[in-house]
Image (tube, rainbow, N blue to C red):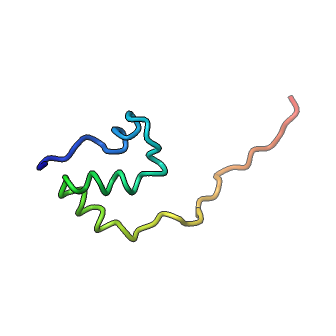
């Protein structure tokens, strides 16, 4: 297989698979046939997005009696 398939997680979802639990396996299987995906997974393998938010609300809702 030389070309990349459509979005692997969408295909897995349509097949009824639990793509949230099986995501890494689904992507690894898809990467075997898609060089750009394999390269991306290699580059991003150790990156995580687990961080505490630094956003603060612009306003604080208050209750008012109408």
Examine the rendered structure and indicate whether residue 47 appears above or below residue 5: below
Farthest residue in the left direction?
A: 2
Residue 31: percent from the left, percent from the top?
A: 25, 56
Residue 58: percent from the left, percent from the top?
A: 64, 52
Side of 16 relative to 27 (left or right): right
Q: Residue at x 38, y 33 (%)?
A: 14
Examine the rendered structure and indicate whether residue 3 appears above or below residue 65: below
- The one nearer the camera, 12 or 66, is 12
Examine the rendered structure and indicate whether residue 18 appears above or below residue 25: above
Q: Residue at x 33, y 53 (%)?
A: 27
- The one nearer the camera, 28 or 59, is 28
Side of 5 relative to 24 (left or right): left
Side of 4 relative to 64 (left or right): left
The quarter of the rendered structure image containing the C terminus is: top right
Q: Residue at x 33, y 38 (%)?
A: 11
Q: Residue at x 27, y 51 (%)?
A: 30
């Amino acid at each position: 297989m030389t070309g990349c398939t459509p979005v692997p997680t969408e295909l897995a979802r349509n097949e009824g698979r639990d793509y949230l639990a099986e995501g890494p396996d689904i992507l690894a299987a898809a990467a075997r046939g898609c060089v750009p995906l394999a390269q991306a997974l290699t580059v991003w393998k150790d990156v995580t997005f687990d961080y505490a938010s630094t956003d603060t609300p612009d306003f604080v809702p208050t209750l008012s009696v109408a």
